[in-house]
Image (cartoon, rainbow, N blue to C red):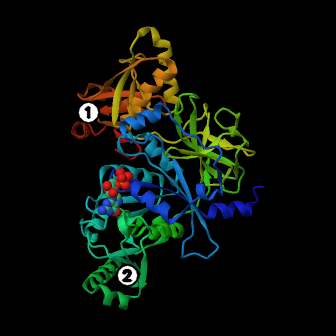
């Protein structure tokens, strides 16, 4: 029997940490994910939460797409338990790592995942510093008030100096880096980490030893400052000096500032060699917030001890050719989830059975028996569910919708054959309501040729594939030469319509968008017509 008392719920929520890694392709997200899992105990293997009976393979057209392009279409959650050596012996934490699709499958879903987490790890390549995709994802975290832990990866390879990297973070995104550990040895000569205490003084030196290929957890040797100086000489002195310098400029951790998104604890690591990975987990446990209350549409908080409620943050359709199933991923906000329970879908008021609840990571699926606040569960055959929807039991609740994010790709959509117009319209409506793409319209283009707006071009391919499979419509697409979208209003629309390189649309949620050819055009218009409304959408552009 699952204990549903407030005490048990609070304890389960308190030991959970739900986070995502935000990074640019190649920064080492996959390598880090594996390294984290190595330090932790996969719950799936331990059999504590899932049974293996429900596992099945998912061969499908989506997977075909995945195979053909060598990318991952599925965004999923990895769950593991972890005991930090810095917490009492009987404290075991449950870590949920929610994957953010990247590479060429970067899409609106990548941003939506961030609505399901309580913290983010910003993974930066020590040689490359801040990169575009990381910046975009960081802006979403900032907008949503998600605290960010910074990990400077690949310290085993030549890169910038640690102080340069911190300066870049501070100057480009206005986030104050507050290192918890400082590297001993320059990038390319990673010897260990100085643990920073009060005023930047070293509390200990964690010396790493390489293992062949980093395949195993790197052995650590803990030394005091004196022993460290004797062992590392000049490298230690430099690290100790720099650490004190940081304190002199106020770059020390402050929990309140971190939770407010103003500062970011920093850890230097090598995901490949497994250096600093334990420190990342320990930091998550010590500093990242546990699942807490979430405000509903009226602004009333739903606390973790309330009856079951969850938010859908991603829907994946058509993964299985035989069943045409739809998998909806929800993050649990309050109460206990038990497989088989009947929940209410807030948007329709209809009951929804959860017989087929699964956790998914990569190609693996396993059945979930129960889950708690912070956990991510996939529901099979969830036809009515769309991102932003709420599920609940007992006490009615509806959470605010997930905002639309700034699209950067635009394409006209038409049916290849006019005789399929009816199906075409139905398909457009369906895919729009599911949030597969954003649909924009204006009087000039009309309903037969709406414009699709997306965060990543992959979303267009999904539209084409689903139109064909589910509605038997061959879709034709034609890219539009716009790069930016800005929020505008009816007053500005007429003048904007006269400008070259601009077109005004209304999105299905009623928001008016001006699509602009490029940033120079935008700057020109803003200078010539400062009275026009041209606001950035949710801070990603
Ligand atoms: P992702 O695209 O962010 O998932 O990056 P991957 O984890 O696939 O890593 C990209 C490349 O960087 C791979 O060749 C990795 O072996 C390499 N890599 C990842 N982490 C490290 C690291 O800490 N040190 C070094 N030297 N290479 C790394």
Residue bearing mark 2? 200
Residue at image x 37%, y 30%?
491
Badge 2 density bin: few <14, some 14–19, many ≥20, Cα 10 Å: many
Quarter holding the C terminus? top left
Taking 222 as reference, is 444 above or below it? above
Residue at image x 32%, y 87%?
231
Residue in front for this viewpoint, 74 or 372: 74
Residue bearing mark 1? 517
Mark with earlier residue (2, 1): 2
Taking 119 as reference, is 385 above or below it? above
The x, y position of residue 76, in whole percent, is 51, 47
Q: Ligand 1 is in which quadrant of the figure?
A: bottom left
Residue in front for this viewpoint, 145 or 325: 325
Element marked by disc 1: loop
Residue 33 image label = none
Furthest residue to the top? 419
């Amino acid at each position: 029997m699952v204990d549903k008392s407030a005490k048990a719920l609070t304890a389960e929520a308190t030991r959970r940490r739900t986070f995502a890694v935000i990074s640019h392709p190649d920064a080492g997200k996959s390598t880090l994910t594996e390294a984290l899992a190595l330090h932790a105990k996969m719950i799936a293997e331990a059999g504590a939460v899932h049974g293996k009976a429900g596992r099945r393979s998912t061969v499908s057209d989506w997977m075909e797409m995945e195979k053909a392009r060598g990318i991952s279409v599925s965004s999923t959650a990895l769950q593991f338990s972890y005991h930090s050596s810095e917490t009492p012996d009987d404290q075991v934490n449950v870590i949920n790592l929610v994957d953010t699709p990247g590479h060429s499958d970067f899409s609106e879903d990548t941003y939506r995942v961030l609505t399901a987490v309580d913290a983010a790890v910003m993974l930066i390549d020590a040689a490359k510093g801040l990169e575009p995709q990381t910046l975009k994802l960081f802006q979403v975290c900032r907008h949503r008030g998600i605290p960010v832990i910074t990990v400077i990866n690949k310290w085993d390879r030549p890169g910038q100096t640690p102080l340069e990297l911190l300066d870049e973070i501070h100057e480009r995104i206005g986030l104050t880096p507050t290192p918890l550990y400082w590297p001993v040895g320059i990038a390319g000569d990673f010897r260990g980490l100085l643990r920073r205490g009060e005023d930047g003084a070293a509390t200990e030196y964690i010396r790493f030893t390489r293992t062949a290929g980093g395949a195993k957890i790197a052995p650590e040797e803990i030394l005091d400052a004196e022993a460290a100086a004797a062992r590392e000489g000049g490298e230690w002195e430099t690290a100790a000096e720099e650490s004190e310098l940081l304190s002199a400029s106020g770059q020390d951790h402050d929990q309140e500032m971190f939770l407010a998104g103003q500062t970011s604890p920093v850890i230097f690591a090598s995901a490949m060699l497994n250096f600093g990975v334990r420190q990342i987990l320990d930091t998550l446990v010590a500093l990242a917030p546990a699942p807490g209350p979430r405000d509903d549409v009226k602004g009333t908080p739903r606390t973790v001890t309330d009856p079951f409620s969850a938010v859908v943050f991603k829907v994946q359709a058509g993964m299985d050719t035989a069943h045409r199933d739809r998998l909806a991923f929800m993050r649990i906000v309050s109460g206990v989830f038990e497989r088989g329970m009947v929940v209410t879908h807030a948007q329709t008021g209809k009951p929804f059975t959860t017989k087929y609840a699964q956790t998914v990571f990569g190609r693996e699926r396993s059945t979930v028996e129960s889950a708690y606040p912070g956990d991510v569960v996939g529901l099979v055959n969830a036809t009515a569910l769309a991102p932003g929807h709420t599920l609940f039991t007992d006490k009615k609740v509806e959470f605010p919708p997930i905002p639309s994010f700034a699209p950067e790709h635009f394409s006209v959509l038409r049916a290849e054959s006019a005789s399929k117009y009816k199906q075409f319209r139905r398909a457009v409506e369906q895919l729009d309501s599911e949030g597969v793409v954003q649909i924009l319209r204006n009087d000039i283009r009309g309903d037969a040729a709406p414009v699709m707006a997306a965060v990543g071009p992959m979303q267009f391919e999904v539209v084409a594939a689903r139109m064909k499979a589910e509605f038997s419509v061959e879709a034709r697409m034609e890219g539009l030469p716009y790069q930016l979208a800005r929020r505008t209003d009816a007053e500005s629309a007429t003048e904007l319509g006269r400008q070259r390189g601009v077109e005004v649309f209304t999105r299905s949620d009623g928001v008016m968008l001006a699509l602009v050819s490029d940033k120079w055009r935008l700057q020109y218009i803003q200078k010539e017509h400062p009275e026009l409304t041209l606001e950035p959408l949710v801070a990603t552009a």
